[in-house]
Amino acid sequence: MNQANGISLVGQVRATLQAVWATSRRVWSILIESGPWLTAGVILATVLEAALSIGSLYAIKLLVDSIGKGLQSSHANQEIFFNLALTGGSLILAAMAQSLANLLRMRQGFLVGDLVSSKIHTRAIELDLSFYESPLYLDSLQKAREAGGQRPAQVIGNVISGLRGVVVLVAILIMLTAIEWRLLPVLLVTVGLALLVRLIFTRRLFQWRMTRAQLERRVSYLDWMITSNHHAKEMRINGLGGFFASQYKEMQTKIRVEHMAIEQKRAVAELIVTAIASLVFMGAAAFLIDSALKGTLSLGQVVMFVLLLRRAEGSGNEVVASISKLVDDHLYLGRLFEFFDTMPRIVRDPNPVAITLPMNRGIWMENVSFTYEGASRPSVSGLNFALQPGKIIALVGENGSGKTTLIKLLNRLYDPTAGRILLDGVDIRKLDPDAYRELFSVIFQDYSCYAETVTNNIRFGNVALPHGEAEIRQAATEAGADSFIEELPLAYQTPLTKLFDDGHDLSIGQWQRVALARSFFPKSQFVIMDEPTSAVDPAAEYELFENFRERLGGRGALIISHRLSTVRQADYTYVLENGEISEAGTHDELLLRNGAYARLFNMQAKNYL
């Protein structure tokens, strides 16, 4: 049983080191990409630092030997002062090399951190919306963030530290061999024990952290709820602060207790290894002193051997610590590289079909179905739906009927799991996704409120378009937002946030009209509105839809609303029930059919009779 465990442990260590080597190759490619000449400079400076460090030890040996000769002869004074100058010069040069190497490493750490952060942002932007709706993805992103930024800089420091330690250790071993080779095996055993302990507990700690990923996200979420302004009102009215704080403390305590248990075991194991190393050093020192007393070693050799032993121990610990950290870095960077290797499912056709404007038929869904990953039933099924140029189309349905999913499919945020979507007869998967999405301006039900100026909140509808004051004001006027914007302290330059100085917050209804202005700003082919007036007052809603066609300026529109008074003027209406289109027609046709639409309309009409 023990033999099997030993083989298993050796196999784990071998597999870990092989994986570390594979990760190191990818780290090396990042180093080269961040700056090949800087990488070469860091390596040369590190080797120089190690060489001068060993040279200073040898200079001390020469100094001690010359002092020994000076005690026996008065003619050795010149040699003593020469070796003293040599020792001082080598120490100064070693310090200069160390400072230079530290500066270069710091510079490279900044560049690599910036490069990796850029790669994380690029990949996060490229990935499909579905990744953001998966807990597994959120765990992956959190680990990528933990690995990104500071972690690559740490990797550089660990690699360089390990390289320096290896160079110094090899040089020390060569010098020790020349003095007394019989002590080398004992020294190597102590270094090996220290490495084994570090590797075992590094892997154990990492495995524990991986099982705690969601719990740590939960702790972060509780901390955000307690300290942010998003839930501040309900937190105080409902007395939730103490409840969430106690949950936070309970989870945090659980994490800390488990972490400390692992760290305590590691501390005991490292203490045992350190005690063994100290005994080895004392035994080696006693052996050397005995050799010096017998005249087989000079005083300089004894001093140098002792210094080399101490330095070897330090370099060995440095190598062990670096390898241990590299294993830890590898385990985290493995998550980072997994994130980099995650590819979007919605990809650009290598030879996309050009979009021709103006459109003729518009956009058509043919038997479109879509099932969310992990769901037991489709969110929408067998949809046949048309969005025609210049026409106002309404989509009606109860909550959970699949309306928002339909919008995401239209914008190709998802690809159908069955059926297809056509633009003037061309499957949209053959079109460039970015060019296709520019056909739409969308205001989602959960629209974004950016901590930016009013102007930026509107121009974020399409930052690639010119954004002069006239265009921004026109979009705000079309959304019925210009009047209250002009009353703000800095009008269109007012920051819409309480996070920063001079900021101003808006009511929910005002925010919704700013979001509407954002959807009106781009001169797109279609405006899609998901509950566009759910937070505005009836007067503002009436004003918006009274001359809605003129506000659209010839664009087509898709309106989703629970208020059927809003969609009466639509050219055509679809009724969505349980992910399927149950009815379709004009307002009058649907009332005559006396189906789901008529039932919903009559229920709302009773409130006004």
Image (cartoon, helix red, strand yellow):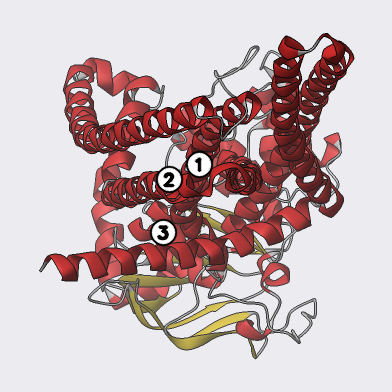
Indicate whether 484 appears above or below 49.
Answer: above
Q: Quadrant of the N terminus?
A: bottom left
Q: Residue 595 occupies which quadrant of the picture?
A: bottom left
Residue shown at the point (76%, 23%) measured from the top left: 95
Q: Residue 29: percent from the left, percent from the top?
A: 70, 61
**Which of the two marks, 3 or 1, is nearer to us in this view?**
1
Q: Residues within 10 Å of mark 3 (few under 14, many from 20)?
A: some
Q: Nearer the viewer, residue 195 or 295?
A: 295
Q: Are marks 3 and 1 in contact (CB under 8 Å)?
A: no
Q: Is residue 540 visible?
A: no
Query: What amino acid is labelled 3 in the image?
Result: Tyr
Q: Earlier in the sequence, mark 2 or mark 3?
A: 3
Q: Are marks 2 and 1 in contact (CB under 8 Å)?
A: yes
Q: What mark, if any, has residue 191 been given in the picture?
A: 2
Q: In the rendered image, which residue does mark 1 sit on?
A: 316
Query: What amino acid is labelled 1 in the image?
Result: Gly
Q: Residue 194: percent from the left, percent from the top?
A: 38, 44
Q: Residue 597 occupies which quadrant of the picture?
A: bottom left
